[in-house]
Image (tube, grey):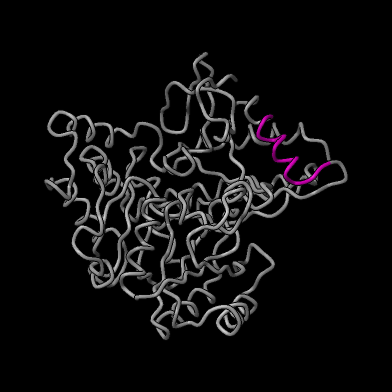
């Protein structure tokens, strides 16, 4: 596929152009239909063109398209902040700033953490992903392709192994690594914040160990360190609850949101305790397009649609379909390259193992192509790009989900053991 005038530094997974979408289905420019298990990389939890969102956007466009909130406030921004206070399950009143993207939310969270603590050091995790802007890059727990050739990045940032039932790292090993970090690399009193994904996205859909999460929360409280949960991909219902940190039994001091927040329109947020969010001087936070009126209208429709009981039902249904398919594929013995199922709820990954003929990454790359030919669009993840991440809309009809899983099975049958 030719991409004239587009930087070659943009990585394209599938060489096609889609023209229209409806819930979990998309059509390319030739009119061919696909089932979309990418969902805008986690942006379309409510699917393509959810009617409630479309109607809200149309109504907003006819009244007010934009106002720079820090110059001239508009009601949509205020309404989103109020809705988030109800939607985010924390015990304290929520204070927030809306941004254009998850990376921008990350950058502003770092500013807020520095301002609130007077410290600079940050702790992040191996295989984590927090964005492609300069400060966010240094948080990422993976060098290629994000950090190659860029030299020194804003810091200081220190990385720990990510403990999970989906990895070989346990809570005790990670806590020992943290103790070593405080003894050898940086004093706890110099650390402004610890940033972690409750469920890693780019890292392969791995759930953080709950025991470690609770120990981390206690440690942060003890040393005056802010705990930042990055839920840009795992939030807004992906795991069956509004946000995945509830699976861990903790509350963050700051929460990063984005992706499915506005169902495809650019909107994200950093939110948390008021005393933390208020730490910078007036003018220290803001942005021209942040909290655009049309994006805010979409977000209000999303939050209104994502009632917790509905999220739970959607995730349980989708999880059951994925788990059953994975079990069937493994028990058949036909796919020796197919490994474990990672994640929680409807945020699931399929690990591809090395075999005598190819690496797990090579098997997955072949599956992406075979899946596309079969009619299902898929996305890789993991440090080695050997984990298939499944991101169909939570609203995907059960029959469409079964069809998509059947197409994956058809694609698996083309792989050589």
Query: Which image quadrant is residue 180 in?
Result: bottom right
Residue stretch rendered in magenta on the structure: 358-369
Residue furthest to the right in view is 356
Q: How many marks?
A: 0
| Apparent side of residue 315 relative to residue 404 in the rendered image (left or right) | left
The quarter of the picture where residue 45 lies is top left
Q: Position of residue 228 (x, y in %)?
A: 41, 66
**Considering the image in quadrants, where does the N terminus appear?**
top right
Residue in view at x 69 percent, y 50 percent? 384
Residue at the location (47% across, 28% down)? 25
Q: Position of residue 287 (x, y in %)?
A: 26, 48
Q: Position of residue 304 (x, y in %)?
A: 25, 48
Most foreground residue, 294 or 30: 294
Q: In this view of the protein, which residue sits in the foreground, 352 or 136?
A: 136
Viewer-proximal residue, 129 or 218?
Answer: 129
**Front-most of residues 369 and 123:** 123
Quarter of the image with the C terminus is top right
Residue 367 in magenta? yes
Residue 87 in the magenta stretch? The answer is no
């Amino acid at each position: 596929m030719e991409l004239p005038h587009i930087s070659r530094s943009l990585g394209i997974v599938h060489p096609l152009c889609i023209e229209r979408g409806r819930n979990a289905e998309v059509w390319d420019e030739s009119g061919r239909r696909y089932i979309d298990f990418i969902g805008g990389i986690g942006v379309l939890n409510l699917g393509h063109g959810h009617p409630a969102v479309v109607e809200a956007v149309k109504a907003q466009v006819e009244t007010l398209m934009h106002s720079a909130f820090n110059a001239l406030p508009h009601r949509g921004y205020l309404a989103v902040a109020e809705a988030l206070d109800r939607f985010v399950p924390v015990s304290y009143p929520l204070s927030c700033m809306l941004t254009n993207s998850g990376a921008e939310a990350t950058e502003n969270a770092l500013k807020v953490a520095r301002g609130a603590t007077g410290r600079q050091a940050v702790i992040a995790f191996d295989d984590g992903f927090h964005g492609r802007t300069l400060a966010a890059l240094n948080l990422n727990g993976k060098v290629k392709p994000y950090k190659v050739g860029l030299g020194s990045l804003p810091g200081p940032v220190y990385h720990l192994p990510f403990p999970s039932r989906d990895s070989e790292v346990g809570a005790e090993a990670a806590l020992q690594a943290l103790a070593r970090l405080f003894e050898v690399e940086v004093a706890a009193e110099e650390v402004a914040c610890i940033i972690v994904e409750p469920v890693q996205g780019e890292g392969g859909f791995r759930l953080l160990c709950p025991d470690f999460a609770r120990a981390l929360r206690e440690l942060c409280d003890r040393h005056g360190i802010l705990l930042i949960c990055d839920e840009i991909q795992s939030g807004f219902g992906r795991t069956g609850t509004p946000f995945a940190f509830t699976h861990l039994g903790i509350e963050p001091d700051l929460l990063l949101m984005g992706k499915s927040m506005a169902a495809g329109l650019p909107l994200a947020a950093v939110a948390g305790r008021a005393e933390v969010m208020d730490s910078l001087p007036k003018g220290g936070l803001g942005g021209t397009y942040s909290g655009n009126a049309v994006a805010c209208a979409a977000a209000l429709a999303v939050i209104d649609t994502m009632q917790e009981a509905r999220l739970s039902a959607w995730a349980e249904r989708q999880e059951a379909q994925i788990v059953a398919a994975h079990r069937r594929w493994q028990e058949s013995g036909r796919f020796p390259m197919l490994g474990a199922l990672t994640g929680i709820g409807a945020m699931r990954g399929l690990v591809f193992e090395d075999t005598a003929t190819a690496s797990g990454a090579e098997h997955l790359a072949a599956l992406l192509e075979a899946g596309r030919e079969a009619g299902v669009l898929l996305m890789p993840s993991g440090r080695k790009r050997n984990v298939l991440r499944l991101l169909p809309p939570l609203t995907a009809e059960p029959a469409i989900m079964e069809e998509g899983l059947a197409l994956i099975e058809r694609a698996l049958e083309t792989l050589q053991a």
